[in-house]
Image (tube, grey):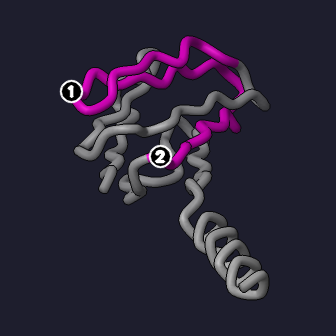
Amino acid sequence: MKMLFKLLAISMLMFSVGVSAGNYSVGQKNKKFTKDKLVIKVGDKVSFVNNDPFFHNVFSLSPSKTFDLGSYPKGEHREVEFDTAGQVDVECAIHPHMRMTIIVK
């Protein structure tokens, strides 16, 4: 009986590790996002890394995820956790032509 509980505990641990949230990185380089589109799952996090020598401001007004990461300089990053399924249109407030889409499943 103890062996059965041990096997059950090990399999539960393996399952929980296998379904943990993902972490993704999107750069900002040459006044562009390094990805046009990113497909992730609910609970995943995306880090936006500024690789340009000037400030960027990443934000979204999408109904499934609204956020504003504020302005930040080269070498810094900001992270967002996506907790609702849907399409998230991401922009830079400083460079309006910078746009990308995140699909949260």
| Picture quarter with the N terminus | bottom right
Residue situated furthest top in the rendering? 70
Q: Which residues are magenta?
A: 43-72
Report how far apart the C-alphas of labels 2 and 1 lie in the structure. Answer: 16 Å
Q: Indicate the position of residue 78 as horizontal and vertical percent values.
A: 63, 28
Image position of 58 with respect to 89: above or below: above
Q: Indicate the position of residue 28 as horizontal and vertical percent values.
A: 58, 39
Q: Left or right? Give the position of 8 relative to 93.
A: right
Q: Left or right? Give the position of 11 relative to 32.
A: right
Secondary structure under tag 2 reads loop
Q: Indicate the position of residue 51 as horizontal and vertical percent values.
A: 70, 38
Q: Which one is closest to the eye, mark 2 or mark 1? A: 2
Q: Label the magenta part by its dominant secondary structure.
A: strand
| Local crowd size for mark 2, using a 10 Å CA cut-off: few (<14), some (14–19), many (≥20) | some
Give the amino acid at mark 1.
Answer: Pro
Q: Which mark is residue 15?
A: none
Residue on which disc 2 sits: 43
Image position of 24 with respect to 1: above or below: above
Residue on which disc 1 sits: 63
